[in-house]
């Protein structure tokens, strides 16, 4: 995404629309640190993807989040949570 100017334009617009509606933004499918950093710079507050964890059942994701603070990375006001689809942020 950071190298694709069209994808970057779409992502930037979507984040802007969400913020103008006072919504939180969740990025799915984050696979690289470069993507995470780009999304954070654009104002994306939450994310999930293989960068943080392979998909796990919801019960396992909840256990990981409770047991291991390392699964919750906090950078300023941005939060990136490991897990699979269905994990509540």
Image (tube, grey):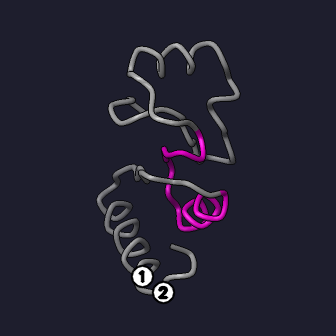
Q: Which residue is mark 2?
A: 5
Which numbered circle lies on residue 9?
1
**48 w.r.t. 4: above or below:** above
**Position of residue 65 measured from the top left corner of the image (x, y, whole percent):** 56, 21
Secondary structure under badge 2? helix
The residue sitting at 47% across, 16% down in the picture is 60
Q: Position of residue 22 (x, y in %)?
A: 34, 54
- The reply, left or right, for residue 17 in relation to residue 82 is left
Give residue 74's position: percent from left, percent from top: 66, 40
User: What residue is rendered at 49% in x and 57% in y?
Assistant: 44
Assess whether residue 49 is covered by the magenta stretch. yes
Which image quarter holds the C terminus?
top left
* Residue in the foreground of this view, choosing between 52 and 41: 52
Where 84 falls versus 9 (above or below)?
A: above
Q: Is label 1 in a helix, a strand or a loop? A: helix
Q: Give how far apart the Cα atoms at labels 1 and 2 are.
A: 6 Å
Residue 14 percent location from the top left of the image: 34, 68
């Amino acid at each position: 995404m950071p190298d694709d100017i069209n994808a970057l334009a779409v992502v930037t617009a979507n984040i802007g629309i969400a913020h103008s509606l006072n919504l939180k933004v969740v990025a799915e499918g984050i696979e690289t640190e470069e993507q995470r950093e780009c999304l954070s710079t654009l104002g994306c507050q939450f994310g999930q993807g293989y960068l943080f964890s392979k998909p796990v059942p919801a019960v396992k994701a909840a256990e990981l989040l409770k047991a291991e603070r390392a699964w919750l990375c906090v950078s300023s006001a941005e939060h990136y949570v490991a897990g699979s689809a269905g994990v509540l942020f």
